[in-house]
Image (cartoon, rainbow, N blue to C red):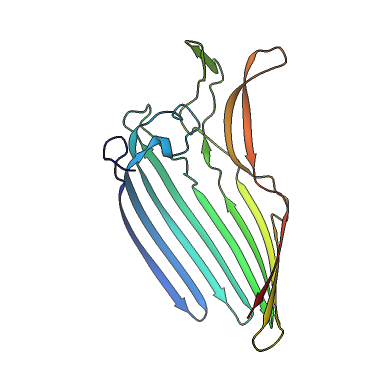
Amino acid sequence: MADNEGVPLIQSKQISAGLIYNHLNWFVNLEGFYKQVEGITSRNQGFQNQFQFVQEQGNYESRGLEFVLNKKTKSFSTWLSYLLMKNDYNFESFDPSEFPSNFDIRHTATLASTYSYKNLKLALGLNWRSGKPYTEPLSSQEILIVDGIQTIQFHTPNNERLPNYFRANISAEYLWNFSEKVKGKFNVGILNILNTKNILNRRYSIDTDENNQLRINQIDELSLGITPNFSFQLLF
């Protein structure tokens, strides 16, 4: 709960401007935006580096440009979207005080298409984005022991980025008309049909090797591989 002392009330302001074109089943939207949020606390930002257990107040600024293109025909609908964004923290008590946000994903693109024929609908989607930032340990003196407490020594916050993310999905939907009042809808979908290995997050912990010597353990959190989904709905 915000108390305007240890946990301030979050305040934000945003400005955006854009252009929209809609004609002959073509839709185009181009929008730029700037957002500033004040009163955030470091403890709720998900830090997994030198600031993980630090409680400080700060703010972040987000600016970007979003583009959406959609084309419709009788059976097809296809759209492309792209987002360019820069998201930076500012914590005056940190060193450095300004650095990329934990959510600073610079480029995001989506390409999707649907096809409809009578009671059948098919869909294909491609999702790509640049890697999120993370903080690497120092290459030398990775572990520092002070008063018996083992601590990882990190580089400048969010100095590295994960590999780019990519996922392809397909789905199908079929609608049965059992009667005028009862219908059945069957859905099948497959997420990540290419079984792409995507790293969602990277963090580090202190471990020991076979000689009982301290070492840094890199932990990668991966997305799911090929994931089928099935569902059946009875509508009445």
Q: Name the spot of residue 135 as percent of width and height, x first.
A: 51, 31
Q: Is residue 100 visible?
A: no
Q: How many marks?
A: 0
User: In the figure, 85 relative to 185: above or below?
Assistant: above
Q: Residue at x 51, y 11 (%)?
A: 148
Q: Quadrant of residue 40?
A: top left
Which residue is depicted at the point 44% across and 50% down? 85
In the depicted view, which residue is nearer to us: 183 or 76? 183
Residue 78, horizontal then vertical, whole percent: 59, 70
Quadrant that contains the C terminus: bottom right
Horizontal side of 62 relative to 165 (left or right) equals left
Left or right: where 198 falls relative to 226: left
Residue at left offset 68%, top offset 13%: 212
Give above or below for 100 relative to 185.
above
40 above or below 187?
A: above
Tell me if I can see residue 58 in this picture.
Answer: yes
